[in-house]
């Protein structure tokens, strides 16, 4: 494990054996019955306790994120705050699990629906949000009465360990369990017969594998994959606001966000001034270690990932694009401030113009600070471009025209849409999930869809004998 800002090796992660995976599931299974029978009143009290524990340790969680992931402190604090929203949503579990009741559905018969927990559920989470994404999953899972096994990324595991310590102070033993591991641990969870459901967030190839392997094993699976998010800018848009949004959404967290804007779609006459405005702002982005107050963008997670991202910029011109700003070599000050043997895994911000589908810089999810610009002549061409992309996670439209905005919402085939909002991540009481190759399975994550994912409905039809005796009737039961 490395500190991305210095390039120095900082720790080793002990990966779980097959036996340890089974042991984690056994502990969760042993706690499942008692936890599922815990009253809603007690469960909600414990969720409020968890909320206070996470809230009281935001600074420590953010420091671990910065140290092991590299993102700047303000970004790390924002991640913890968004995860905390999901805990707060789960504090409303008595209302969220309130069932339905039909009195006298038929003569003397009542029908009611109850949401039952699944049992043991597992979460497999990515490196780029080591606190927020686990809280997306575990808050709803345990509030619904399930026990939870978390397998975080081995690249930045310490935040999940602190999170586990906080959970242990607020929830009974065995309700939440953290398992450090890599691919064999994932396979173990997918194949274990006592794991009823698996939640996953990560790249599209892995998400597809998780979904197929999990469902083949008879599990309920939600698997969120990758993205290629577009920001469409119409000629009437506020140019300064659009340029600022492109900078913030394209280079924030070094582009290591599944909701990052990686493609700006410039419509008609806005293209030249928009490219100039974005390029003019790039020198203002201060790159450096995440624990330095002045830093606006930190390093990438590993040297290998940095080199992969750099290769897209190096190959862009040969593919027919124009490299307006080449950030494949970071500013010298950023490298020097990182220290260490390598100076950290930094890159600068890159801007590539005249990009088209079929180029690697457009087709692939780069997951780094590379912003591509595609020029189109019309609104219709912009919509067709976005809809033809195999991903459908997020999209944004910048315009002053309310009619165009309403039309865009109807025309676009993407799961999360922003209107003059570059990163349309829903608040915790809505659900997060894309379309097409960005989501495998029927269920988005957190919010109301999260409650549905972690429960199964049970319908009870009841009749209590009338004081007067009934005659024998062998006919087919009919509603009367």
Image (cartoon, helix red, strand yellow):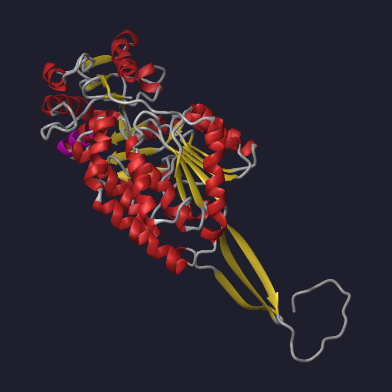
Q: Is residue 278 above or below residue 73?
A: above
Comparing 438 with 1, the one in front is 1
Residue 261 visible in rendering: yes
Drawn side of residue 255 relative to residue 100, left or right = left
Coordinates of residue 328 in the picture (x, y in percent): 23, 15
Dominant SS type (magenta): helix
- Give the image quarter of residue 297: top left
Residue drawn at point x = 57 percent, y = 36 percent: 190
Comparing 391 with 46, the one in front is 46
Drawn side of residue 224 relative to residue 84, left or right = right
Q: Is residue 38 above or below residue 394?
A: below
Residue range (magenta): 240-246
Drawn side of residue 422 relative to residue 462, left or right = left
Coordinates of residue 373 in the picture (x, y in percent): 28, 24
Comparing 139 with 157, the one in front is 157
Q: Which quarter shows the N terminus?
A: top left
Drawn side of residue 361 relative to residue 210, left or right = left
Residue 379 visible in rendering: no
Coordinates of residue 63 in the picture (x, y in percent): 23, 38
**Magenta span contains residue 242:** yes
Q: Is residue 88 above or below residue 361?
A: below
Q: Which quarter shows the C terminus?
A: bottom right
**Magenta span contains residue 155:** no
- Give the image quarter of residue 257: top left
Residue drawn at point x = 55 percent, y = 43 percent: 25
Residue drawn at point x = 50 percent, y = 29 percent: 206
Residue drawn at point x = 24 percent, y = 47 percent: 58
Q: Residue furthest bottom?
A: 468
Coordinates of residue 199 in the picture (x, y in percent): 49, 42
């Amino acid at each position: 494990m490395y500190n991305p800002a210095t390039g120095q090796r900082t720790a080793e992660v002990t990966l779980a054996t097959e036996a340890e995976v089974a042991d984690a599931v056994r502990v969760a299974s042993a706690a499942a019955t008692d936890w599922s029978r815990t009253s809603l009143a007690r469960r909600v009290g414990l969720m409020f306790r968890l909320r206070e524990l996470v809230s009281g340790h935001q600074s420590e969680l953010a420091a671990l994120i910065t140290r092991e992931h590299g993102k700047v402190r303000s970004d790390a604090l924002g991640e913890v705050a968004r995860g905390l929203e999901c805990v707060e949503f789960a504090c409303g579990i008595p209302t969220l699990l309130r069932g339905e009741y039909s009195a006298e559905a038929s003569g003397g018969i009542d029908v009611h629906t109850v949401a039952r927990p699944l049992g043991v559920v597992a979460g497999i989470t990515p490196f780029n949000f080591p606190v927020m994404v686990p809280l997306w999953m575990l808050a709803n899972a345990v509030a619904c009465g399930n026990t939870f096994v978390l397998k975080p990324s081995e690249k930045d595991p310490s935040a999940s360990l602190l999170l586990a310590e906080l959970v242990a102070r607020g929830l009974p033993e065995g309700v939440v369990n953290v398992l450090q591991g890599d691919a064999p641990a994932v396979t173990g969870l997918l194949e274990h017969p006592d794991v009823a459901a698996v939640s996953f967030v990560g790249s599209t190839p892995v998400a597809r594998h998780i979904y197929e392997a999990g469902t083949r094993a008879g599990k309920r699976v939600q698997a969120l994959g990758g993205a290629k998010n577009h920001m469409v800018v119409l000629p009437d848009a506020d140019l300064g606001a659009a340029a600022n949004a492109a900078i913030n959404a394209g280079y924030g967290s070094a582009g290591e966000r599944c909701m990052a804007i990686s493609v700006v779609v410039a419509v008609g006459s806005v293209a030249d001034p928009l490219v100039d405005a974005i390029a003019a702002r790039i020198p203002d982005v201060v790159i450096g270690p995440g624990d330095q107050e002045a830093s606006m963008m930190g390093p990438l997670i590993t040297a290998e990932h940095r080199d992969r991202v750099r290769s897209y910029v190096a190959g862009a011109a040969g593919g027919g694009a124009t490299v307006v700003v080449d950030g494949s070599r970071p500013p010298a000050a950023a490298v020097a401030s990182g220290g260490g043997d390598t100076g950290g895994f930094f890159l600068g911000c890159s801007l590539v113009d005249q990009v088209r589908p079929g180029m690697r810089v457009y087709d692939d999810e780069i997951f780094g600070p590379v912003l591509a610009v595609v020029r189109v002549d019309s609104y219709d061409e912009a919509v067709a471009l976005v809809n033809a992309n195999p991903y459908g996670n997020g999209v944004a439209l910048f315009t002053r025209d309310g009619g165009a905005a309403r039309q865009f919402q109807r025309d676009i085939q993407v799961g999360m849409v922003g209107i003059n909002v570059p990163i349309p991540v829903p608040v915790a009481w809505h659900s997060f999930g894309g379309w097409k190759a960005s989501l495998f399975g029927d269920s988005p994550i957190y919010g109301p869809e999260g409650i549905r994912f972690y429960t199964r409905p049970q319908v009870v039809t009841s009749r209590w004998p009338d004081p007067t005796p009934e005659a024998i009737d062998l006919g087919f039961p009919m509603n009367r």
